[in-house]
Amino acid sequence: MTWHVAEDDVRAYARGELAPPMLWSADTHIANCADCRALLASVTDPVALDAGWERLDAELDAPKRGLVESLLVRIGVADHTARLLAATPVLRRSWLGAVVALLVMTVLVTNALKTAQSPTLFLGLAPLLPLAGVALSFGPKFDPTYEMTVVAPMHGFRLLMIRTVAVLAAGLGLNGLASLALPGYGLAALGWLLPALALTTTGLALTPRLGPVLAPSLVGGGWVLFLLAAHERHSGTLAPFTPAGQGVAAAVAALAAGLLYLLRDRFDARPAGPWGAA
C-alpha cells in the first residue's frame, strides 16, 4: 500500500472534524491499514475514547422501544410516560387478542339468538371488559414496571388516570366496534357504555381501600349478581339498559368520579394491602 492518510487528517479524523469526501477515504483506508490505525490510536484522546465506548455500551444496553411506545412518543407523549403506558399489561397483544376473540364470539351468539329486544348477553359482558382491564393495570402482581412507578417522581393518581384513560380508550374502542356488528338493535347496542363507566369509576374509587384486584372483582361480581336478579324478575329489557337504568348508571359514574377525586392522595401512600402486594 503506497498511500496513507496524512497525520493532520488522522488527527482531524480522531477529533471528528474531517469532512467528506476525505472522511470516506480515510474510513476505508484506516479499516485496512495497520499503520494508520496505529497512528490513529497514538493521537486519540484516551478520555474521549473511553467516553465514546461508554456511550456505545449505554446505547446497546438501552431497551428498545416497542411499537406502542414509539407511536406514543411520536405523537408527543413524554418518554417516561410512554414507557409506563407501553408496559401496561392490558395493552399487549395477548390481552387485546383475547378481548377481540371474546367480543367476536359474543356478537356471533347474540346475532344467532336474536330473540330479545336488546342484546342482553353483549350488554352484560361489555361493561366488565374495561373494568377487568383497569384491574390488571396496577399493582406488583400484574405491572412489570411496578418498582419503577413506586420510585418515579410522579403522583400516583396521575399514573392511575394515565393508564385508566389508555385502557378505557382500548376497551371502549373495541366494545364500540363490536356494537357496530349488531346493527339490528340500533342504539340499544350502545346500552353498555354508561354501565361500563359506572363500574370502572366505582372500582377505581374503592381501590385505595380494597386494592386494585379485590375492588374491581367485587364490583364485577355485584354487576353479575344484579343482572341475574334482574333477569329473574323480567325477561325483557333488563333494568340497567332501560332509560331509567341508564340515568342511574350516569349518576353512579358521576358520584364515583367525585369520590375518586377526593381520594386522589390515597394513591401515593401505596400500602401493601391496597396495592395488591402479597
Image (cartoon, helix red, strand yellow):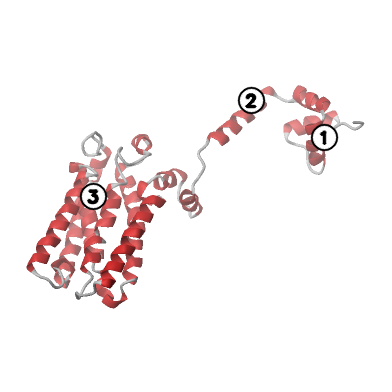
Residue type at the position of mark 1: His
Direction from residue 136 to residue 24 in the image, left or right: right
Q: Quadrant of the C terminus?
A: top left
What residue is drawn where x is 73% and y is 35%? 16
Question: Do callouts 2 and 1 mark residues in contact (Cβ within 8 Å)?
Answer: no
- Front residue of this view, candidates 90 and 211: 90
Residue 262 seen from this side = no
Residue type at the position of mark 2: Asp
What residue is drawn where x is 18% and y is 42%? 210
Tell me the residue that label 3 is attached to. Answer: 204
Q: Kindly report the distance in space between the C-alpha atoms of the residues bearing marks 2 and 3.
A: 50 Å
- Front residue of this view, candidates 169 and 118: 118
Q: Residue furthest left?
A: 233
- Mark 1 and mark 3 lie on one chain; the one further toward the N terminus is 1
Determine which quarter of the picture holds residue 208. top left
Q: Kindly report the distance in space between the C-alpha atoms of the residues bearing marks 1 and 3.
A: 65 Å
Q: Residue 218 in the image: state x and y as whole percent.
A: 17, 49
Q: Which mark is residue 102?
A: none
User: Mark 1, residues whose alpha carbon is within 10 Å: few (<14), some, or many (≥20)?
Assistant: some
What residue is drawn where x is 38% and y is 36%? 148
User: Mark 3, residues whose alpha carbon is within 10 Å: few (<14), some, or many (≥20)?
Assistant: many
Q: Residue furthest right?
A: 2
> Is disc 3 placed on a helix, strand or loop?
helix
Q: Kindly report the distance in space between the C-alpha atoms of the residues bearing marks 2 and 1.
A: 23 Å
Q: Residue furthest front?
A: 112
Say above or below: 199 vs 42: below
Direction from residue 111 to residue 24 in the image, left or right: right
> Is disc 1 placed on a helix, strand or loop?
helix
Say above or below: 227 vs 242: above
Q: Which mark is residue 29?
A: 1
Q: Residue 58 in the image: state x and y as whole percent.
A: 55, 33
